[in-house]
Amino acid sequence: MNMITPLAPTIIDGKAEAAALTQQVAAETLALRSQGVIPGLAVVLVGSDPASAIYVRSKVRKTEAAGMKSFSHTLPAETSEEELLTLIRQLNADPEVHGILVQLPLPAHINRDAVLDTISPDKDVDGFHTVNAGKLAVGRTNGLIPCTPAGCLILLKRVISSFAGLHAVIIGCSNIVGRPMGRLLLNEGCTVVMTHLKTRDVAAEARRADILVVAAGHAHLVRKDWVKPGAVVIDVGINRIDTPDGPKITGDVAFDEVAGHAAAITPVPGGVGPMTIACLLKNTLQAARALTDKEASS
Amino acid sequence: MNMITPLAPTIIDGKAEAAALTQQVAAETLALRSQGVIPGLAVVLVGSDPASAIYVRSKVRKTEAAGMKSFSHTLPAETSEEELLTLIRQLNADPEVHGILVQLPLPAHINRDAVLDTISPDKDVDGFHTVNAGKLAVGRTNGLIPCTPAGCLILLKRVISSFAGLHAVIIGCSNIVGRPMGRLLLNEGCTVVMTHLKTRDVAAEARRADILVVAAGHAHLVRKDWVKPGAVVIDVGINRIDTPDGPKITGDVAFDEVAGHAAAITPVPGGVGPMTIACLLKNTLQAARALTDKEASS
């Protein structure tokens, strides 16, 4: 495909890309600290879901490793919505906090939308606030972008030099990945196809893709015959499956079949996953800079 | 196509649909007035563009005909951005005003985005505020939706009973029509394809559409061989062309070729156009109700 110039090996190394991005963020954080600003990220966890606890610990560790301040708030599962909103308002007002992340999922008695929209859009490092979703939707570039699609776009830019007119197909239309991914690629000039569970023939749509982003949450949904030779495939899936050798993490793409057939592909693990946290740090740095500039000009 | 149940004649009569919707809005306005609330729409025009002046007069007339209050503000072309923002803030604070519409385009020295985002999202009857774009983007139903795509969806619902899995192709990705239209149809369960000037083969995309929405601003771009037999075609284009019989308004679709081939089609004029103002009145009524409820509960 002449519109894609491979600049990197076929298997996109998300781990190496994330390490490079994290290093760059750490260097810029150091520079910002020398101006007296220490980027600070507050992570809020409600309840004791073990997977969420692992994610939160990992975020805290990487935040501190990048030279940022980390503020961890763990609340019991029975925390009321109003108590959570009160904490968020405190964090909104706290000048040491530049980013606020509320770990999802929340307990069922708490209205997720109300929580996400109470976070100041300026500190919304997950990019889930309506204002940030709206900025991305209308093509403004001054918002905070959800971390996973932002990471996917960085990986795509490693292997694609010009997006204009490329046919991008998104499988899975969540607000966390698929929808913002579609908006990012539309803003880059792609033709964008949004597919989901109701799409009649997802395989046929996938086969037409130059760029195929799969965020379906279905292990090995995408097989070789779903992929056009020379396509770039981004696998956002993280599925736990049982194998004869024990449990294993695998993606939404049948990697062994598709790699070599595609021009480039992300592995699972080691593809999109590491980029998500790196982009969280990048967003925190961006928020710290923007808030500092805002304060200076006010 | 078995997923589409024609409920109306082939040519979708936007004028009749708009009249019916306007009548319904007028009846509901009367009911609201009996509770002491008169929906009020403020229309702001900067400069003396003749086409804009015609639009504004038409909006004022139809607002009043629907039993609403109309507040018209015509400012000279040399109005500063700050003066315009001051007026908008006054209208935001005015309890008699439930909807605020700033007629576009604005003079070049005024930042359109700053103006649109100064309008209170609750009074943003054009649906162009970032918050309303964001609500639509994430699939929330409590926002104000841009009038033209809202009108297109109403027309589509007259001829389509179930949208789930239908293949919708949008030609033209503006923030006023194409992008919000794509979001509306995605929220309805369609597979959605966003095409634009950079798309390599728009005709090939169009030919795959069950629902084809054309907002390209290019007279007669869509010919018979762009349309799958049985598709539903919505023509948003309003183009002034010269003919041997004098100047004429025509759409983005070659109507004479496509009608009869498509299952249903909107004409130009008399299709989408009249729906836009009817939806503006509908949004003003919705805003008046929501603001009244908000006040009552505060």
Image (spheres, coloured by chain):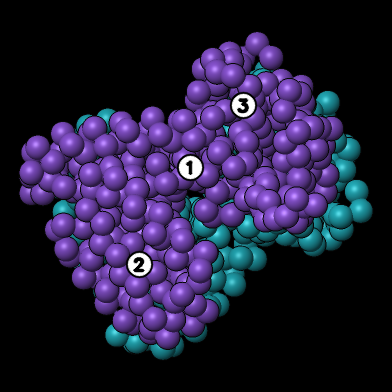
Chain colours: A purple, B cyan
What residue is pinned by disc 2? A44
Amino acid on which the number 2 mark rests in the picture:
Val
> Quadrant of the rendered structure where residue B109 is?
top left
Look at 24% across and 32% down and name the residue there: A27
Q: Compared to B198, does B95 lie above or below? A: below
Percent across and percent down for residue B10 are: 83, 48
What residue is pinned by disc 1? A274
Q: Compared to A57, does A237 lie above or below? A: above
The mark found on residue A11 in the picture is 3
Percent across and percent down for residue B106 are: 31, 38
* Chain of the residue under label 3: A
Which of the two labelled residues, at mark 2 and mark 3, occupies the earlier sequence position?
A: 3
Instruction: Confirm whether residue B27 shows in the render.
Output: yes
Left or right, B12 with reference to B145: right
Compute the Cα span from label 2 to label 1: 20 Å
Compute the Cα span from label 1 to label 3: 15 Å
* Chain of the residue under label 2: A
Instruction: Confirm whether residue B274 shows in the render.
Output: no
Which class describes the residues within 10 Å of circle 2: few (<14), some (14-19), or many (20+)? Answer: many
